[in-house]
């Protein structure tokens, strides 16, 4: 069962735990540059879903770019997007299979939610959640929004 989740941005922790540990392993979280766009979109296309490519493409039209990436050397190993499908929405986000379990997804989530808070949002909606429910509850205290699916996604061509 899929649904959206609500996050109180004003209740996020004051700092992003785990960021320094990732950096000590050579994994860095940052906003991409505009010239990184095609490479990031290819990364998403090769590792995730077509719709996610579209959402990340929109993130590059925002100012500031509403995407964060995780890199190890010159390799993109994860990404997170916000304000793409709708304003105040977090997602999509993904981490390369080889790098899962290191806390990259957690840091990407928090970095994007911190950016939303810094931009003046009080709440964020995590769209189209299914198997990651417990992750979002644990990391940011997200709560399911009843009767929220398909919600904004009901008019997607691929859902018809």
Image: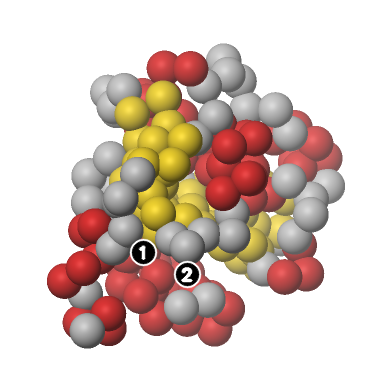
Label 1 crowd (10 A; few <14 / some 14-19 / many >=20)? many
Query: Residue 28: horizontal and vertical position, in percent?
Result: 66, 47
Tag 1 residue? 56
Query: Residue 97: horizontal and vertical position, in percent?
Result: 72, 70
Do labels 2 and 1 touch, CB within 8 Å? Answer: yes
Residue 140 showing in the rendered view: yes
Looking at the picture, tell me which residue is in the foreground, 109 or 119: 109
Query: Residue 141: horizontal and vertical position, in percent?
Result: 55, 29
Where disc 2 sits, the SS reads: helix
In the displayed structure, 124 sits above or below 98; it is: above
- The residue at 48%/17% (across/down) is 11
Q: Quadrant of residue 157?
A: bottom left
- Quote the CA–CA distance across marks 2 and 1: 8 Å
- The residue at 63%/62% (across/down) is 95
Label 2 crowd (10 A; few <14 / some 14-19 / many >=20)? many
Looking at the picture, tell me which residue is in the foreground, 146 or 75: 146
- The residue at 53%/76% (across/down) is 48
State the residue lying farthest toward the right: 25
Q: Which mark is residue 130?
A: none
Where disc 1 sits, the SS reads: helix
Question: Marks 2 and 1: which is nearer the front?
Answer: 1
Looking at the picture, tell me which residue is in the foreground, 115 or 156: 156
In the displayed structure, 126 sits above or below 123; it is: below
Tag 2 residue? 40
- The residue at 63%/27% (across/down) is 16
Query: Residue 116: horizontal and vertical position, in percent?
Result: 36, 33
């Amino acid at each position: 069962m899929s649904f959206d989740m609500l996050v109180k941005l004003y209740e996020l922790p004051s700092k992003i735990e785990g960021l320094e540990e990732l950096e000590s392993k050579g994994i860095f979280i940052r906003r991409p540059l505009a010239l990184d766009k095609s490479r990031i979109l290819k990364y998403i296309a090769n590792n995730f879903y077509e719709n996610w490519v579209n959402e990340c493409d929109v993130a590059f039209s925002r100012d500031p770019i509403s995407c964060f990436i995780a890199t190890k050397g010159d390799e993109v190993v994860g990404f997170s997007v916000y304000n793409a499908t709708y304003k105040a929405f977090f997602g999509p986000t993904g981490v390369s299979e080889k790098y899962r379990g290191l806390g990259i997804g957690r840091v990407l989530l928090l970095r994007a939610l911190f950016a939303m808070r810094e931009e003046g949002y009080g709440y964020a909606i995590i769209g189209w959640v299914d198997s990651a429910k417990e992750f979002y509850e644990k990391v940011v205290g997200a709560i399911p929004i009843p009767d929220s699916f398909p919600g904004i996604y009901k008019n997607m061509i691929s859902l018809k």
